[in-house]
Image (cartoon, rainbow, N blue to C red):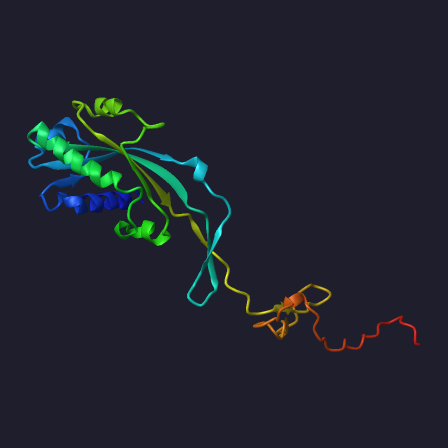
């Protein structure tokens, strides 16, 4: 899911004109060594914090059906995570960096979610809204100054971007539909072993494909009961 959010952000920024202008979009950590190796104008989108949005955690399971309408699996609800990025612009002059950062800001604040056509993989399959917020208040995440200190670089102008993305739940295969009834087999009274050649008697509803509106609990015609076998000691009528 994380790499799919990265790809959505990459497509969004490239579509704003960065790709046409020859600007690289990277997701590397902007360390001092990375900055020294950079050779072209670059927008760096660095993911530095991931945490679950516990308020959006669901319960229960959803049902998954195949093309024929048969239940094939049960899936737990998706869990939502907040991804926080530090976005910076890198060029030869501060004026060019600020111009790049302004272009990035305009592209991000114009969207309150990653557009559906830009989503890939599980994010596209789930069809849920992937919310996006740029330059908003940072809550329960490391401050930009702490991030720069951990990276060992000099602090510079940056944008905080947060994305709320779902992680698909776990699917567990369901048992196949019951198409056969129970089988009753007799056993010898002494040693408990099944009689040789006993294939058993299968119990099943005759309307197994369509039980009707009342279901299997509704009234149905039953054949007459077989005659009771007489045992020793039974009195004659």
Residue 78: x percent and y percent? Answer: 41, 46
Quarter occupied by residue 144: top left
Could you tell whether 72 is left or right of 162 in the image?
A: right
On screen, residue 10 versus residue 81, left or right, reads: left
Q: Position of residue 164 (x, y in %)?
A: 34, 40
- Which quarter of the figure is the C terminus placed in? bottom right
| Residue situated in front as seen by the camera: 114 or 188 | 114
Q: Residue at x 38, y 48 (%)?
A: 168
**In the displayed structure image, the side of residue 228 where residue 197 appears, left or right:** left
Q: Residue at x 68, y 63 (%)?
A: 192
Location of residue 162 (image quadrant): top left
Does residue 90 appear in the picture of this structure?
no
Q: Is residue 150 above or below residue 41?
A: above
Most foreground residue, 175 or 190: 175
Q: Residue at x 13, y 45 (%)?
A: 19
Of the 4 image quadrants, the one containing the N terminus is top left
Residue 130 visible, this orientation: yes
The x, y position of residue 195, in whole percent, is 66, 71
Left or right: 235 as drawn, with respect to 1: right
Give how far across and how far down residue 5 sits, in percent.
28, 43
Number of labels in the image equals 0
């Amino acid at each position: 899911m994380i790499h799919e959010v990265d790809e959505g952000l990459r497509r969004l920024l490239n579509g704003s004109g960065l790709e046409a202008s020859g600007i690289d979009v990277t997701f590397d950590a902007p360390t001092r060594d990375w900055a020294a190796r950079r050779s072209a104008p670059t927008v760096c989108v660095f993911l530095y914090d991931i945490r679950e949005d516990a308020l959006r955690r669901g319960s229960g399971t959803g049902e998954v059906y195949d093309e024929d309408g048969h239940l094939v699996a049960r899936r737990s609800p998706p869990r939502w995570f907040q991804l926080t990025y530090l976005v910076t612009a890198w060029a030869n002059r501060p004026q060019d960096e600020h111009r790049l950062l302004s272009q990035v800001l305009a592209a991000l604040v114009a969207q309150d979610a990653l557009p559906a056509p830009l989503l890939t993989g599980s994010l596209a399959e789930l069809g849920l809204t992937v919310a996006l917020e740029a330059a908003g208040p940072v809550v329960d995440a490391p401050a930009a100054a702490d991030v720069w200190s951990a990276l060992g670089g000099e602090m510079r102008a940056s944008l905080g971007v947060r994305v709320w993305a779902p992680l698909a739940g776990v699917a567990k295969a369901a048992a196949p539909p019951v198409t056969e009834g129970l089988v009753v087999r007799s056993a010898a009274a002494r040693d408990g072993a099944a009689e040789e050649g006993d294939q058993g008697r299968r119990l099943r509803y005759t309307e197994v494909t369509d039980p009707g509106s009342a279901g299997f609990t509704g009234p149905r015609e039953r054949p007459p009961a077989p005659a009771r076998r007489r045992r020793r000691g039974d009195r004659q009528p």
